[in-house]
Image: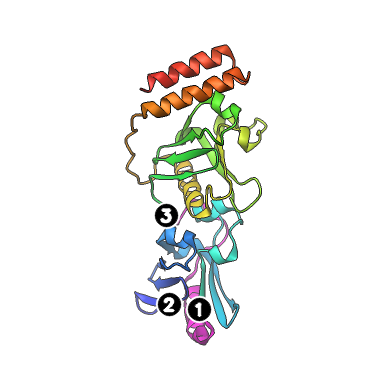
Amino acid sequence: MSRMGDVLAGFHAAWEFDSDSVLIRYEGGMRTPKLFQALGERRVPLEAIAGVTLTPGKRGTVVLRAEPRPGADPLMEAAAGQLKEACDPYRLVLPAEREVLAEYYADELRARLTASGPAERFLVQAPKGPLSFKAYDGKASFDGTSVAFRWFWTGASSAKWKAGDQRFAVTDLSGVEWRSPEMFEGHLRVLRRDADAAPRVQPDQDPAAVVFGLGYGPVHESLPFAAAVLAAVRDRGPVAAVPAAAPRRDPADIAERIRHLGELHQAGLVTDEEFSVKKAELLAEL
């Protein structure tokens, strides 16, 4: 790190060292974890790093890892320790023959670290929007100012259908709860300030949550989404994004929604009043 622009290349990523930060560029190859491909590159200020380790890896490798300070990176805060080791964005795997060079950079980094303990604010930039992904029961979208959930016919519970599609302004939220799709009952839930003290219902019944399933809400889509929302909530303002114009609903889609609503009504899951109100809302979208 005696010179700006020094680069240490490993498997799936390369670290470029600057005087006050590390620029991590992730590869786009087929063997690269999809989360890394989605992130592309990240600039990590040295003040966001608490420590550096170099340890033996598997099959003739060594692992250089920067330990982020708690509260410094919205991605790691949203992940809450749920990422698998191979998907750790602060982990650089190198051939064992590069251990001496890796130790040199590790020592240089350690010498320049000055901060420790929890960070008072996010120091690493959150993924930029607009962002969206498909969960099992709906599509989640974030335009930098609000989170929207649009329910799917095939997966959403009757409770979510009764509540209708949802939109939550960043200014009304207190945080985000992300449970990895690789775990049982994976979901993403936005936490509303006016509901913080209320008991939480199951995610599949909560209109403030989307649930994941096999192939739905993958880590590389849902985690950056959660991080971007969390950063916007902490900042109490929008992340850099260009809000997408809301498209007009397809009449065929509206007709299908009304048909499904009628089925729920006939099954006794929706009252007469709820059916009339929701049908009027759908017709107003044409």
Label 2 to label 3, Cα distance in Å?
22 Å
Find disc 3 in the rendering and name its residue: 125
- How far from the left and from the top, in percent, is residue 275? 53, 16
Q: Earlier in the sequence, mark 2 or mark 3?
A: 2
Q: Are marks 1 and 2 in contact (CB under 8 Å)?
A: yes
Give the amino acid type for the residue marked by disc 3 in the picture: Gln
Give the amino acid type for the residue marked by disc 1 in the picture: Leu
Report the magenta residues as a range.
95-124
Disc 2 residue crowd, few under 14, some 14–19, many 20+, Cα 10 Å: some
Q: Nearer the viewer, residue 50 or 90?
A: 90
The circle drawn on residue 8 is 2
**Quarter of the view holding residue 282:** top left
Residue at 59% x, 44% y is 187
Image position of 285 with respect to 138: above or below: above
Q: Secondary structure at mark 2?
A: strand
Residue at 38% x, 71% y is 19
Q: Is residue 135 visible?
A: yes
Q: Secondary structure at mark 3?
A: loop
Image position of 117 with respect to 189: above or below: below
Find disc 1 in the rendering and name its residue: 94
